[in-house]
Image (cartoon, helix red, strand yellow):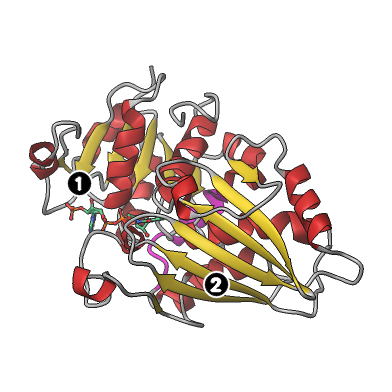
């Protein structure tokens, strides 16, 4: 049995990891630690939760893998400590997703907290980075929005099926858990209930991550908040190159993901949130819309967009079956 630790275990992503790890066949009960406020409280909140202890990095000496589920900025320091103690590290924050520290500073408004670590980081969109993840010691788990956008786009870019001169519009909608557990004016119940709002248009930080991974495309990324707790639905509007229609786009995706356990390409119809909530699936559906093609990409932001993809990556890093613990 391998030993793993979850740092930031009292947050939404950390708790989701604890839920998944409970059913993992090759991991012993995880060390669950949290920074500040809620240590111990989660155990009282639910009889099914592992207890969450205060952060004690000395305990990381004996673990094989560490999941860092803290906010960006703080996460880099925790990841560096775990890395120095010899653990395989999957960081769920944005701290190691951007390869260029100048781009990080421009996007996050502060210098990178651990620039010397960037050379070790692999961007862990698992389906497209499997061989690099297997040998990595530090994996930057992709953001939830980028996962929902890059999984459908990358095979089409590789196959040169898109009109390179036309922008791709990514109209993306997330459940409120994507914003973490601390309420803000935008995310508290009264603002979200029976509402839907676009936010951070043209400035959302995930835009930099998407641009890094598909530099040849201009992606117009418009995030929205849904009046739902979990789930993400992204509608992509794209112009294929001449002679390419919706059927060719669907075939390309179906072929690219034919052997992938966690990406499903619909033969007919379009996915919705209920189809993917609480699962590690990203579901893709394709439809013709005049001269454009529409792709709908649905996933659970807390699972495929965070904890589930992190577990896929950790499994690979520790030499286990990629699907272990993921149903
Ligand atoms: N939510 C999502 O859908 C999602 C998706 C992809 C990636 N992520 C990323 O995953 C990370 C966690 O997200 P979340 O939604 O779970 O956030 P969250 O609900 O706000 O939880 C944050 C966690 O980090 C801990 N923490 C806060 N400040 C800290 C510090 N200075 N040092 C160490 N730990 C600290 C908190 O501990 P206390 O409770 O003790 O304060 C809590 O356990 C973030 O980097 C986020 O961007 C989240």
> Percent x, y for residue 104?
48, 70
Question: Is the residue marked 1 within 8 Å of ligand 1, measured from its CB?
Answer: yes
**Which residue corresponds to mark 2?**
171
Residue at left offset 78%, top offset 57%: 249
Residue at point 46%, 53% (across, down): 273
Q: Is residue 223 above or below residue 95?
A: below
Give the image quarter of residue 319.
top right
Front residue of 187/77: it is: 187
Residue 324 in view (yes/no): yes
Q: Position of residue 291 (x, y in %)?
A: 80, 75
Magenta stretch contains residue 93: no
Q: Residue furthest right?
A: 243
Picture layout, residue 109 above or below residue 256:
below
Q: Nearer the viewer, residue 293 or 117?
A: 293
What count of labels does the image hold?
Answer: 2
Ligand 1's quadrant is: bottom left
Decide: few, some or many residues near mark 1? Use Cα within 10 Å; few <14, some 14-19, many ≥20.
Answer: many
Whether residue 114 is in magenta: the answer is yes
Name the quadrant of the N terminus.
top left
Circle nearer the N terminus (2, 1): 1
**Left or right of 171, for residue 92:** left
Residue at image point 22% right, 73% down: 184
Label 1, secondary structure: give it.
strand
Q: Quadrant of residue 278?
A: top left
């Amino acid at each position: 049995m391998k030993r793993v630790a979850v740092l930031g275990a009292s947050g939404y992503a950390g708790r989701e990891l604890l839920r998944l790890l409970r059913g993992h066949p090759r991991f012993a009960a995880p060390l669950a630690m949290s920074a500040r406020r809620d240590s111990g409280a989660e155990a009282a909140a639910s009889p099914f939760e592992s207890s969450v202890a205060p952060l004690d990095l000395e305990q990381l000496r004996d673990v094989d893998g560490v999941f860092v589920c803290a906010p960006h900025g703080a996460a880099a320091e925790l990841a560096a400590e775990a890395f120095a103690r010899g653990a395989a590290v999957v960081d769920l924050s944005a701290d190691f997703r951007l390869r260029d520290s100048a781009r990080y500073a421009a996007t996050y408004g502060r210098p990178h907290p651990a620039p010397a670590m960037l050379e070790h980081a692999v961007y862990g969109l698992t389906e497209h980075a499997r061989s690099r993840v297997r040998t990595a010691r530090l994996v930057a788990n992709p953001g939830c929005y980028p996962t929902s956008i890059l999984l459908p786009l990358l095979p089409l870019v590789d196959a040169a099926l898109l009109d390179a001169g036309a922008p791709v519009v990514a109209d993306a909608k997330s459940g409120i858990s994507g914003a973490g557990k601390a309420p803000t004016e935008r995310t508290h119940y009264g603002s979200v209930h029976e509402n839907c709002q676009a936010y951070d248009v043209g400035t959302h930080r995930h835009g930099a991550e998407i641009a890094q991974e598909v530099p040849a495309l201009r992606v117009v990324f418009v995030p929205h908040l849904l009046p739902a707790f979990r789930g993400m639905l992204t509608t992509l509007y794209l112009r294929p190159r001449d002679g390419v229609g919706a059927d060719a786009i669907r075939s390309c995706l179906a072929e690219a993901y034919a052997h992938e356990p966690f990406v499903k390409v619909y033969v007919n119809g379009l996915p919705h949130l209920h189809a993917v909530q609480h699962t590690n699936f990203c579901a893709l559906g394709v439809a013709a819309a005049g001269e454009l093609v529409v792709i709908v990409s649905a996933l659970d932001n807390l699972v495929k967009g965070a904890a589930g993809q992190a577990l896929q990556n950790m499994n690979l890093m520790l030499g286990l079956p990629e699907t272990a613990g993921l149903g």
